[in-house]
Amino acid sequence: MALGLIARIRGERETVGIDVGHYSIKYVKVYHDANGKRIVRDIDLEPVPAGSIINGLIQRRESDDMAGEKKEKDGFDMLGEAFSKLMLRHPIDENVDVVASVNCGAGEGGVLVDHMSIKVPKNGNEEAIIVQTAQSRPPFDDQDNVLDYEVVSREGDEVKVNVVAAKSSMLDSWAQFFTRKGIKLSALDVDIFGLLNSFVATASEEDRKKTTAIFNIGDNKMSVGFIQDGKFHSVRSMNGGSLNVIINKLSSSLDATPEKCHEMFEKNDLKVIEGVAISVLEDAMKVAFEELMSQITFGIRYFSSAEDARPLEKILIGGGGAAVPGLLEYIAEKTGIETDTVNPFRSVECDSSVVGTEGISIALSNIYAPALGLAMRKF
């Protein structure tokens, strides 16, 4: 039910977070009262048609010049139909702030993020110097990049900034998609930032102070964000590492279908794979984890190489990977670092009609986490 005029005058607001991944579109609506209290009022998801998004880009046919011929649906059409189904179940009022994120990992549609220290002389044009310095460094020097930055701190003539760059073609494609679907966005974000925000917005003050790596393990890609001193530090996208890496190895070694592997992850139950001894399955899982672990190790080394990095105190797993049986224990054993799931819904109030009496499962909590983080923003 839409908020009335009086409620909005009092400072009440509703924000919708929409996270578009390769596997599903996640929807979360959050109510913000005048005192800053937030309540989850709605959650839902809709499967993304296979092949409609690749490397963060909506797949379009090269030409629409097919006079007199029946056109096959491209990724834009298929994704649009899936999105329309979700919106039919959850119409968005024009007064609701909408924040969308897209699954933009490494590759053609990748989003680049880095932490830089830049010298800005007294009376120098800070903005121009930051942009010019960033554009002179690979990979930010690509002419097709749209570049933005956030100042983290200023000490003397040294300015520390987080620099973000995205392909203009990717941004144009997604902006066009939401416009055509009648959605007026308050912001367009990236899924890993949504995940980081869900952690910062729901974690205790003690947990926020810990130097933490948050890995978002999705179906087709993995990314990691780092929190230090309660603030965002940096982000890294991985060229490998995903649920599909684990699923492909399990499917080949156990002769199990990908659908069965997905079911096992969603239910967090090894018994879903019938006819295989638990000990055999556990050994196969550890072999499947090895490639994923190499990417996690790479992400940790990337963070450790930063000049201001402190030793990691905690690893958190989000996305579908958070529900893989035995993965958290495997990562903790290999790294020697406390490992857990993000699971932000355990720390945020939810309307009883949304999650029922039993609450939301850990698997779904981590799948919805980026969308929740987007919806926790208030404009």
Image (cartoon, rainbow, N blue to C red):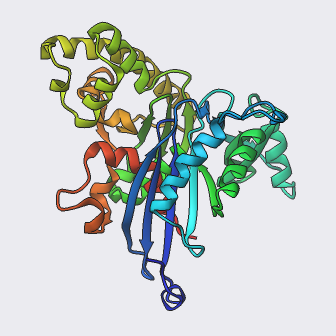
At horizontal 28% and vertical 36% (from top left) the residue drawn is 266
Count of number-bearing discs: 0
Q: Which of 159 and 144 is in front in this view?
A: 144
At horizontal 63% and vertical 36% (from top left) the residue drawn is 75
Question: Please, which residue is most extreme toward the bottom here?
Answer: 6
**Camera sees residue 149:** no
Left or right, 186 with respect to 211, comes to: right
User: Residue 113 lies in what quarter of the image?
Assistant: top right
The percent position of residue 234, horizontal first and vertical second, equals 56, 40
**Camera sees residue 71:** yes
Q: Nearer the viewer, residue 71 or 130?
A: 71
At horizontal 50% and vertical 76% (from top left) the residue drawn is 13
User: Residue 290 lies in what quarter of the image?
Assistant: top left
Q: In this view, does 150 lie above or below 57?
A: below
Left or right, 41 with respect to 176, comes to: left
User: Residue 353 lies in what quarter of the image?
Assistant: bottom left
The percent position of residue 203, horizontal first and vertical second, equals 35, 56
Q: Is residue 161 above or below residue 92?
A: above
The percent position of residue 245, horizontal first and vertical second, equals 42, 19
Question: Please, which residue is most extreme toward the front here?
Answer: 68
Left or right, 148 with respect to 104, comes to: right
Q: Which image quarter is the C terminus in?
A: bottom right
Q: In this view, does 84 lie above or below 326?
A: below
At horizontal 70% and vertical 57% (from top left) the residue drawn is 179
Question: Please, which residue is most extreme toward the top here?
Answer: 253
Q: Which of 53 and 106 is in front in this view?
A: 53
Q: Which image quarter is the N terminus in?
A: bottom left
